[in-house]
Amino acid sequence: MTTSLYLLRRLLQAVAVIFIVTVVVFGLLHSLPGGPARGILGAQATAQQIEQFNSEQGLTKPLYVQYFLYLGHLLHGDLGISYTYNESITQLIVERLPKTLVLTILQAVIALVIAIPLGMWQAAKRNHPVDYIATTVSFVAYSAPVFFLGLVLIIVFSQTIPLFPSQAPNGATLASVFANPAALVLPIATGAASMIAVFSRYMRSSTLENLSEDYVRTARAGGGSGGQILRRHVFRNSLTPVVAMLGYYVPVLFGGALVIEQLFNYPGMGLLFWNAAQSSDFPVLLGCVLVISVATVVGTLIADILQSVIDPRVKAGRT
Amino acid sequence: MTAIPPVMAQDTTAPLRDEASGAPILDVDDLVVTFSTESGPVEAVRGLSLEVRPGETLALVGESGSGKSTVALAAMGLLSGNALVQGRVCVGGTNVVTASDPVLRHLRGSTASMVFQEPGTALDPLTRVGAQIAEVIRNHRDVSSAVARTETIDLLRRVGIPDPESRVRAFPFQLSGGQCQRVVIAMAIANEPRLLIADEPTTALDVTVQAEILELLRRLAVDSGTGVLLVTHNMGVVADFADRVAVMYRGEIVETGSVEDVLLAPRHEYTKRLLAAVPRLKTAADYPAVTGRAQDVVPRDTDTDSVIALNDVAVRFGRGPSAVNALDTVSFAVRAGETVGLVGESGSGKSTAARVALGLIAPTSGTVSLFGQNLRKSGVRARRRLQAGIGVVLQDPVASLDARMSVGEIIAEPLRVHRRSMSRHDRERLVGETLEAVRLPAAIAGRAPRELSGGQRQRVSLARALVLRPRLLVADEPTSALDVSVQKAVLEVIGELQSELGFACLFVSHDLAVVQDFCTRVVVLRSGRIEEKGLTGETLVRPTTDYTRRLLAAVPVPDPIVQRRRREDRLAALAAGETTAGE
Amino acid sequence: MSAVIQPGKAEFSAQVAGPTGSRLAIARFSRNRLAVVGLAVVVFFVLFCFLGPLVYHTDQLHTALSEANQGPSGSHLLGTDAVGHDELGRLMYGGKVSLIVGLAAGLLATVIGTVWGAVAGYVGGWVDAVMMRVVDAGIAIPALFILLVISAISTPDTFALVIILGFVSWLVPSRLIRAETLSLKNRDYVLTLRAIGGSHTRAITRHVLPNSVSTIVVAATFQVADAILLVAYVSYLGLGVQPPATDWGGMLSAGLTAVYSGRWWLILPSGLAVILVVCAFNAIGDGLRDVFDVRGR
């Protein structure tokens, strides 16, 4: 299978998934108590207002017609209006999504840069005391609720030892995010911590599996040293399954962003979502769910493409 | 040396033996290897001594568990961490047992190299083959990458890979098993080693590819005067390649000697038994007019209709341009009471044909009739009743039995499917009888599969297949994963039971010698098509097609003198212009 | 065995004279020290939460504002919260809810995931493709987002919470079980059964399911760990149980604001409890995976 055929197939799968997501979101919208009218007009709407809204918006039409109308709106980039902010939701998201992306991408990059070498090193030093310590720390970081972790970091590094501010930069534009880099440290560290824990474990077990593979024995028989074999052969082979897991970790990253942005008051999509939940602003809530899901699907696609770059067997359909 | 026409390959059987004087390149003295496992220490090698001189090939023969691979790995210092090694193993003067890591690294790949059994997994799947060969070169010699690349291409040419300039950039998954093995050999000879250790180098390969790889190894060894330690269980390979033989049993050497002495006049009981169990391919030279098995089995049924028949069956996997025709217009039948062998190399479609016969794969076109009924046209219940007349034995002794069931439950399963009303007492009785028939103690019914050996497992599989007294036994490589002596026992059991119970047998195998012995008729498959078919005594002794002839010529015979002649004939035929399966 | 097969005695047979299956399993598990510690931790917390209140009596129903916001002392080993409840008692009380809801939700997620994954894996074809796209879609929506949306709609009771958490978490085990089922349905012993006329039902109930047990058990352990962690988030997101009932997550969110004023006893014990228990289940899952030699995750 050539590259383009493989990409096409993955793209089609991604589109199918996005379709299903729109159905889910649509379903949620219509399963709200009081229907979407209440969702959009708010809890205070009177029965009359709801009736008027329903007939205006065509909510009396059959469900599948409404679904296609909904899809039509989506394709035009219309996610509706937020009644708390009184702005187009699309506009709100366009403002805030990039900031969330900056946060999550930075978290992911830093986490991977630390986790991958750490995992490999742990595998090489298996059952050494240091391996146990690193494993234990990983377990703890992985088992702690993100907000608890963030809180502990704030207490230690912001209050007890005032090193970093506990509030993230709050400007409106994307550039303002970088105005005070120190303010980004704690949010990123909180998000990266559990990702480092998870991916170092993956890398460790993947490396361990690869160390007992035949090709390692062949390389040793050719006179290669342990370090050389690790770097040149084991590393890339161990990386493949880990990259595959990246795709599935993207929603976890976004979920974490929700909590982190709330904790550190970072003006991204997570905070938007949080505030909308507090005020039951359903259009915003569902619009965000849709966008985040699409972002996740795109992220998974990117991870898959990355995998096919590292591993040429993926395109040929044999792994 | 006699005068030889330039086109023909050199006679290489009496090479540099005169130069094979001087210090042995491999000198093993009282080697003891103990593994510490979950269930306690296991002594794999007990006080073994052998030597390999420069220019000679020593074959280390034994069955599974004899410890021969352990010896090979010990010679390179490649045993796993839980192995305790005692004794002396000197490679070119250096004692591998006590050598430090840097010394070992210096030795591996330059003084001594190794070729392994599974070519498919021996190479790093994510690195191009050229780079892997170049790495071995640059591990030991300080050359630029350009020089290494030129040498790599040269090596690929030497090991017989066509179009080396472009193959250099190939990934292992793009090469066949035989080609991967050639790459591994190229890595092994890259630095002109004085000792080459080959651990079952051709076991995972087709017989024609095996012949080519062996020829390659012999030529390389002779050209460079390398000493070769050849580890194998295949006596034919030994007869083809080795100068001297050492027979291993349970961690010790029981007999050593020249290849003629050991193979033609064995002295030790074990060697004699081992050689007696090796299926021997009969050639036209042996039998002027043989007709397969001595007596045809008298079929129980009076009608001679076929038990199973494939008519014009085609099987296609996938769609569009990348579709694969696993079978193409295949027609053959098995009559009541007879044994039909399905032979072919890997990719020939023989396993696919067996699965079509079993109803596991639906043919894309063509019909399959079981006991006279078209399988696909029958309803579910009718199908099931028909399938009660089939017994199945597959290749892998481990995967054939569900590890979570006891032996008794496994054998009783067909009874539960087709004789639900049978009482428990009757079931157990029948299971016991069947176990006895396959020469297993009835008490084994309470054991779990993991407590059994490979041969025992296959006999349990056989018992399961026969418990309903079927009319047809479909056996897909039933003994290929077993040691040769166990194989003989299992095949004997099948043969006896066939005489007793009168079932027909569809026997899939790649081992032509076994098929010759066991089957009355044979079907030769090649790339999904029938190459030829007929009585075993004719088709496999005097074949009509070139392909079958080549296939037979490539099978090594465990008689060194005969094998030498066969090799010469084969090389002559190749040189005379017939095309090889150019790998 | 007859003399004919004597040379074959050398053939290697796995674990012929070894210990029985379960003894070997226990030995293998014990070798993983973290797993053993994890087991001990879980046992400790179960005893702590369910038997503790019998030993250490506290009143978790009535408020006692006069005792509010006190630090650890002789009468209140871990201090009191904003309405005067004893924190240590609350830890036991909340632990019961966290553990029960977590266990139930984790098991529910495993059951749903197993059924979905097994069907997809066994049936294969387009059914499998569609079912797995649904799973992909479900994974694409972060669980926390869904939970927050639900919190905006209503506050569910404990039973509904278990159902919601179960339905949010079944996706990951479904993929694992599907992979296991795919591999099992092509095993030789299943093929043999089908060839001689065995039904699909028999293949699934007698062969595929029993052999998937190890994967399911390992998946279940990790699911319980994830569920207990998710329960801790739930109160933070506004879905939690109503006071005076509480769970560890509730204790954490209630105490969050107090932290800045230095009242560490309000969040540290509950936070540590969550971490320890989740960690413990993860370690046990890891150990079980070693025992069963299960791949994946």
Image (tube, rainbow, N blue to C red):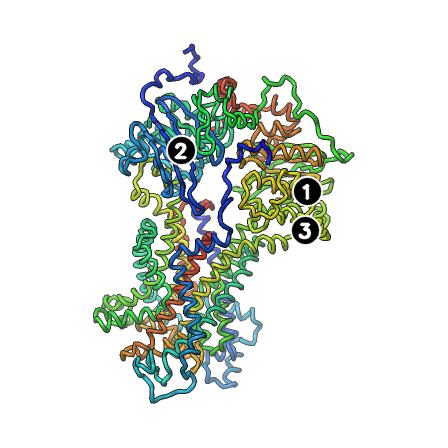
Helix, strand or loop under label 2: helix
Which of the two discs, 3 and 1, labels the residue nearer the N terminus? 3
Q: Secondary structure at mark 3?
A: helix
Tag nearer the camera, 3 or 2: 2
Q: Are marks 1 and 2 in contact (CB under 8 Å)?
A: no
Q: Nearer the viewer, residue B79 or B564?
A: B79
Image height check: is B225 above or below C4?
A: above
A79 up-or-down from B23: above or below: below
Q: Residue at x 55, y 54 (%)?
A: C121
Residue B525 visible from this viewpoint: no
Of badges 1 and 2, the one in the foreground is 1
Q: Earlier in the sequence, mark 3 or mark 2?
A: 2
Do dots 3 and 2 share one subunit? yes
Near mark 2 (Cα within 10 A), the count class, few <14, some 14-19 or many ≥20, is: many
Quadrant of the rendered structure where residue C143 is?
bottom left
| Mark 1: amino acid | Glu
Where C155 sits versus C130, above or below? below
Q: Which residue is mark 1?
A: B433
Q: Amino acid at mark 2?
A: Val
Out of B101 and C295, give the one closest to the viewer. Answer: B101
Q: Answer yes or no: are tags 3 and 1 on the same subunit.
A: yes
The percent position of residue C94, horizontal first and vertical second, equals 42, 76
Residue beneath disc 2: B71
Residue B523 in view here: yes
The three-letter code of the residue at mark 3 reads Arg
For marks 1 and 2, the one nearer the N-term is 2
Output the chain of dot 1.
Answer: B
Considering only vertical position in the picture, is B344 above or below A6?
above
Q: Residues within 10 Å of mark 1 (few under 14, many from 20)?
A: some
Res. B357 mark: none
Residue beneath disc 3 = B416
Specify the subunit that label 2 lies on.
B
